[in-house]
Amino acid sequence: MRETPGKRRRLRRKLRPQTESETALTCATRWQWPVLPGAGLREPRGVGAVTRAARAARAVRTAGAVQASRGAGCACPYPDCTAAGAHPFEPGLLAATTDARMVGWWWEQRPDAPVLLATGGRGASAVSLPAVAGARALGALDRAGVRTGPVVATPDRWAVLVRPYSLSELGEVLNAQDWVPGTLRFHGDGGYLALPPSRTGAGPVRWEREPVLPAGERGVVAAPWLPDVTAVIGELTAACAQLAARAGQ
């Protein structure tokens, strides 16, 4: 069958399931997104030492084991930590890098460490909101024909990845909105976001919408496509406002 000119479909492929180490290396070396390991979760008392090989092999976990991470304590020394496992500790955020040797060494030492994306700069930024509002916003964007990129999800919150934005650009975008709900959070320069398949105190981190990679030249993998924040902010804001209005009824 001959292919009609102009009708050729551009081949794309999804990201296959990966371990924390593989995800970190993919982000750093192929997509050029700076990453670093998160603080991680504290091992329950009474659990014996696990060999490094066994820890690396735990790429697939049962649903019960994954759910057990929700509410677990942070491995950092602060008992009142409000972002258990999902924040930088050692090293700090400024150490985020795309260097393959450094990233490989970090996850060789701690194979189960959460993968933290350093947002803004040359990587990706994000806007996060409550999960219920996120589902409503994505549905509205789909109906409007607005293309979205990867979406990261925990049981309580979703984060829509977007192209990096500056504070001044974000200010202009927000000034155009009638009201910006406090449940909307912005992950730009100086921020971070846990990526799948990380485990945090908020529960498992997964892809609600997986990265779809454009087909490139042989051996070359481009970063996932990302929308501008201006394309999605209206529906994200509206969804949060609707959720707040219903909660106030």
Image (cartoon, grey):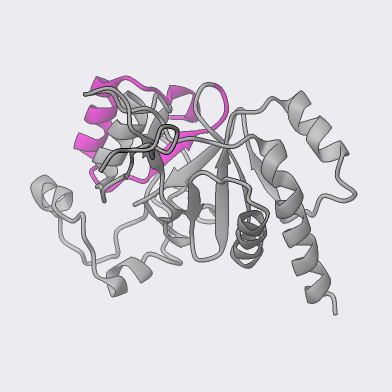
4 displayed left or right of 156: left
Q: Closer to the camera, 90 or 130? A: 130
Q: At x 62% / y 68%, what residue is drawn?
A: 132
Instruction: Specify the segment rendered in magenta.
Output: 92-121
The quarter in which the N terminus is drawn is top left
Give the residue furthest to the bottom.
249
- Residue 99 colored magenta? yes
Quadrant into which the C terminus falls:
bottom right
Residue 163 percent coordinates (x, y): 58, 31
The answer to whether residue 115 is seen in the rendering is yes
Q: Where residue 243 sits: x, y (%)? A: 75, 68
Is residue 120 rendered to the left or right of residue 93? Answer: right
Residue plotted at (53% across, 52% down): 83
Which residue is at the front of the view, 51 or 119? 119
Quarter assignment of residue 244: bottom right
Residue 32, image x and y in percent?
Answer: 40, 24
Tell me if residue 68 can be seen: no
